[in-house]
Image (cartoon, rainbow, N blue to C red):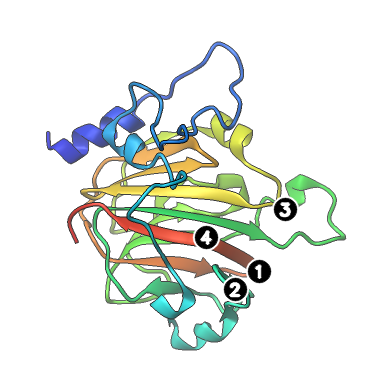
């Protein structure tokens, strides 16, 4: 077993079951960016951009292109450190640069309709982050996806029937504890190691996969029918490219 696989298995295996309901921030790193003792390498690497953490660079609208090309008109960057999409037409923003092993951190929120008061009516608000996107773009690309959909937040799936993504962890109880309501900012961290992925929602470990056949590619942000705001998007290259 490779070191990359061993690291992800250590960080993303059977979910810990605390004896009492944990606080959503219980898995956050300390002020020096150190994760809790006993975490695997992948989880420690995703501990987050704590104060003084080095190596992250911002991802801006200017660093990206769009597919289909006309979808770029649905994206804008009115405020520093933020870009938004109207959600239409369906497509995705993708980084011009390709990434292999990396840690991606971002916050996002959906616009909450004033007329809707029931949370269940908002579960279908949908977006996502595409990982290892190939140069052959299509709707949707042959790549893994980290879910931004509200009721599946930080889950991981395959975007194509001919790409196997073996999910070894998806912690729904922790997702429900960590997730903030539609209209509020949620933070997702994605760690890529040798084709394996791990995700964290507001500092809490949610999902992990075994390595898939893809190892590098563009990173994409989906536009899928709902207005979405992204901010503080930043990425750190952690190894191979």
Which numbered disc flags the more N-terminal residue, 4 or 1? 1
110 lies above or below 76: above
Q: Which is in the foreground here, disc 3 or disc 1?
A: 1
Q: Answer with the quarter of the image where residue 214 lies.
A: bottom left
Label 4 to label 1: alpha-carbon separation = 17 Å
- Residue that mark 1 sits on: 227
Q: Position of residue 168 (x, y in %)?
A: 35, 34
> Which image quarter is the N terminus in?
top left
**Residue at (50%, 59%) from the top-left corner?**
128
Q: Secondary structure at mark 3?
A: helix
- Residue that mark 2 sits on: 85
Q: Name the residue nearer the viewer: 213 or 16.
A: 16
**Residue at (85%, 60%) from the top-left corner?**
114
Q: Do labels 1 and 2 touch, CB within 8 Å?
A: yes
Q: Secondary structure at mark 2?
A: strand
Which mark, by number, is residue 151? none
Which numbered disc flags the more N-terminal residue, 4 or 2? 2
Within 10 Å of disc 4 (Cα), the crowding (few <14, some 14-19, many 20+) is some
Which numbered disc flags the more N-terminal residue, 3 or 4? 3
Which numbered disc flags the more N-terminal residue, 2 or 3? 2
Q: Do labels 4 and 1 touch, CB within 8 Å?
A: no
Which numbered disc flags the more N-terminal residue, 3 or 1? 3
Q: Position of residue 76 (x, y in %)?
A: 58, 79
Q: Name the residue nearer the viewer: 117 or 94.
A: 94
Label 2 to label 3: alpha-carbon separation = 18 Å
Quick check: 34 left or right of 72?
left
Q: Which is in the foreground here, disc 2 or disc 3?
A: 2
Quick check: 112 left or right of 171?
right
- Residue that mark 3 sits on: 122
């Amino acid at each position: 077993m490779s070191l990359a696989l061993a690291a992800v298995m250590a960080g993303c295996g059977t979910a810990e079951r605390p004896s009492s309901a944990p606080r959503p921030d219980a898995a956050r790193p300390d002020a020096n960016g150190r994760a809790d003792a006993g975490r695997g390498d992948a989880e420690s690497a995703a501990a987050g951009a704590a104060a003084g953490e080095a190596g992250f660079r911002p991802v801006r609208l200017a660093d990206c292109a769009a597919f289909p090309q006309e979808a770029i008109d649905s994206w804008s960057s009115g405020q520093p450190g933020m870009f938004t999409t109207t959600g239409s037409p369906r497509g995705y923003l993708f980084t011009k640069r390709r990434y292999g092993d990396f840690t991606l951190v971002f916050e996002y929120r959906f616009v909450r309709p004033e007329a809707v008061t029931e949370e269940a009516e908002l579960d279908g608000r949908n977006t996502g982050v595409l990982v290892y996107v190939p140069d052959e773009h299509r709707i949707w690309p042959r790549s893994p996806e980290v879910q931004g959909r509200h009721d599946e937040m930080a889950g991981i799936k395959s975007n194509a029937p001919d790409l196997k993504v073996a999910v070894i962890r998806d912690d729904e109880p922790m997702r429900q504890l960590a997730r903030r309501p539609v209209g509020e900012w949620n933070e997702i961290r994605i760690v890529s190691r040798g084709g394996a992925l791990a995700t964290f929602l507001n500092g809490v470990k949610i999902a992990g996969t075994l390595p898939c056949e893809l190892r590098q590619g563009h990173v994409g942000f989906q536009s899928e029918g709902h207005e979405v705001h992204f901010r503080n998007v930043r990425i750190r290259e952690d190894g191979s490219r």
